[in-house]
Amino acid sequence: MPTRPRPYILVVNGRKVRQPVFVIGAPHSGADLLTRTLKRTPGFHFTVGQPSVLSVVYAFARAPSISEGRGQAAAKVLRDAFAQAWQVTAHACLTCSPECQGAVTRPAAGTCVDERTISRYGDASPALIYCAEGLVDAFPDARIVQIVRDGRAVVAAMLSDPQELAWFRRGVANVDSEFPNPLFGVETEEDRAAWPALSAAGKSAMRWRGAVHKMARLRNSLSADQLTTFRYEQVITEPQATAIALAAFIDGNLPKIEVPHGQKNPESWRRQLSPAQLAEIEKVAGQQLRRVGYGGYRNAGGYPAMARRECRRSWFSRFSAAMISGKWLNACGLLPTWR
């Protein structure tokens, strides 16, 4: 394993950046649920979609070759981007994404956080997963929070999102010029050959599959103290237990995770996807769906009913250091069975 760079001192708003928290996952995997909670956590300055970060993240995501073999340089670029994004100014709040702005109540001419109370930083910008290794190089003490969701639900959500569908336009999907291409999930020559004939559902499934592979590699390379994984279905059914687990992982005091009514049905994809779309998703990502625990289950959570009942019955008694190491999450069916 390559050695990590030496700790880098970054000071923003007069405070040293310490153990920043980054939330990553495939598009529409539920990062917004954790983002809203972290935005409301006392002492946290949590951003989403700041232009300085998006420009760098999307550049690295679309052309990973520009950062390959340039670990230190890429890390510096990321640190500089976040140093700018985390500056607390009214202008910075105005340039944040609607998701970020809607997470907290902000005065008309004010900022979303009191600069004097900041002790921790974090970010959950889209496509952050595609430069996760660079984040750890840039911030060796970072805490990475992964969230995984049923790929069929992810595909259904992506198909209703014009911004995600825009990635599939001709001239945007650079699968021929950039190979392999993690952003589009194109990992093999077979993937690249199949890409042009896939529908939007199939391409979305390939993106989800690529993100799952990416998360598996991260889990194998980072310690349980630095990376944890949550399952979307567990977040919406057990928000209190999830908040406690997340708080323990990042060493913070989190408020309650609020789940909007429209996100409480984890199997809405069943009425949104056609049989043809489901068949294509199965062809592209069926193996990965089953590998992470989603194939064939019919209970509402998308994971074994026995694990769900056991989780509800005994999560409190089993809440200990084992949870942070991942044992508790795995026992409750929260962790994907990576291979």
Image (tube, rainbow, N blue to C red):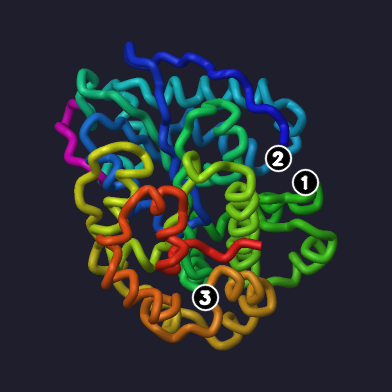
Tell me what residue is drawn at x 62 percent, y 84 percent: 279
- Tell me whether circle 3 and circle 2 mark residues in contact (CB < 8 Å): no
Please give the name of the residue rendered at 33% of the width and 11% of the height, measured from the top-left corner: 14
Q: Which residue is mark 2?
A: 63
- Say what secondary structure mark 1 lies in: loop
Which label sits on residue 294?
A: 3
- Relative vertical location of residue 196 with respect to residue 243 in this rendering, above or below: below
Mark 1 in CB contact with mark 3 (< 8 angstroms): no
The 10 Å Cα crowd at callout 2, few under 14, some 14 to 19, many 20 or more, is many
From the viewer's side, name the closer residue of 224 and 321.
321
Q: Position of residue 104 (x, y in %)?
A: 21, 41
Which region is colored magenta? Answer: 103-110
Residue 211: assigned label? none
Q: Residue 46 lies in magenta, yes or no?
A: no
Amino acid at circle 1: Glu
Q: Earlier in the sequence, mark 2 or mark 1?
A: 2
Residue drawn where x is 36% and y is 74% of the image: 308
Q: Where residue 31 appears, x then y in whole percent?
A: 40, 52
The answer to which of 222 and 70 lies nearer the viewer is 222
Q: Is there any visible trace of residue 202 in the rendered image?
A: yes
How far from the left and from the top, in percent, is residue 49?
43, 39
The quarter of the displayed image where residue 282 is located:
bottom right
The residue beneath circle 1 is 178
Q: Is residue 178 left or right of residue 92?
A: right
